[in-house]
Amino acid sequence: MNIALIGVSGRVGSRLLAELLRRGHQVTGIARDTGKLASQPHLVLKNGDANQPAQLAPLLAGHDAVLSALKFATTDAASLIAAVKHAGVGRLLVVGGAGSLEVAPGHALLDTPDFPAAYRPEAEAGRRFLDTLRSERELDWTFLSPSAEFVPGERTDKFRLGGDQLLTAASGKSWISMEDYAIAFVDELETPKHPRQRFTVGY
């Protein structure tokens, strides 16, 4: 597939890129500054700002899907959606956050008393982004939330998928490596099972 990956220079974006290239996809990697990234076969690098739809849309045109690995606190969901639509791309897959996952019916992880204050602005922005997607009626979107701990690690290809509820292991820990997250993300790209839905991945 011919994929546009926005946020290619970030920690999650770089792992999505590795997984996409591993599986033979053609990738246009987009970031505000791609100057420090190395060129690779099947990768084209472009500088672009997700909050500038008129600038971004031409970079997205002609792709089979757009993947977003952007930080929510600095991204305007409406601008990104407008750029994808203007580019004529029908699919948008978003690297989500864990804060909006439920720990009990109607109660999000973000709203628990022990949720770290340092992560709250990004988590709240992620919840707003998801709400914006849920009101979107034209794009075929998917939002994949990681588990509570989302860290660099190993590519094991052993994980579970869930819906809107936070996944926890038998030990009580909720976590997923960025490498295994990338597998689940590209699996969804290749074999769509969650159109216009949020789902999650964890151990």
Image (cartoon, rainbow, N blue to C red):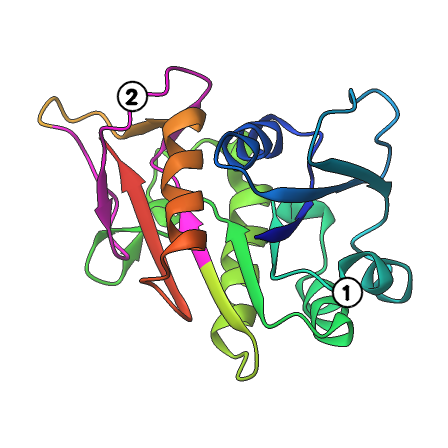
Left or right for 107, reference 86: left
Q: Secondary structure at mark 1?
A: loop
Mark 2 vs mark 1, CA separation in Å: 34 Å
Instruction: Tell me, yes or no, whether the highlighted magenta stretch contains residue 158.
Output: yes
Q: Is residue 47 visible in the rendered structure shown here? A: yes
- Under mark 2, the amino acid is Thr
Which residue does the numbered mark 2 point to in the structure image? 156
Residue 117 rendering spot, x and y as whole percentages: 51, 33
Q: Is residue 70 visible in the rendered structure shown here? A: no
Q: Which residues are magenta?
A: 143-169
Residue 151 rendering spot, x and y as whole percentages: 44, 21
On screen, 67 above or below 83?
above
Marking on residue 89 = none
Q: Residue at x 45, y 53 (%)?
A: 189
Q: Nearer the viewer, residue 94 or 105?
A: 94
The part of the image, by quadrant, that contains residue 167 is: top left
Q: Earlier in the sequence, mark 2 or mark 1?
A: 1
Asked if labels 1 and 2 touch by Cβ distance under 8 angstroms, the answer is no
The part of the image, by quadrant, that contains residue 37 is: top right
Q: Secondary structure at mark 2?
A: loop
Left or right for 191, reference 27: left
Instruction: Tell me, yes or no, whether the highlighted magenta stretch contains residue 42.
Output: no
Which residue does the numbered mark 1 point to in the structure image? 61
Q: Main secondary structure of the magenta part?
A: loop
On screen, 174 above or below 195?
above
Q: Residue at x 83, y 31 (%)?
A: 34
The part of the image, by quadrant, that contains residue 28 is: top right
Q: Residue at x 55, y 78 (%)?
A: 136
- Under mark 1, the amino acid is Ala
Q: Nearer the viewer, residue 42 or 5?
A: 42
Q: Nearer the viewer, residue 29 or 74?
A: 29
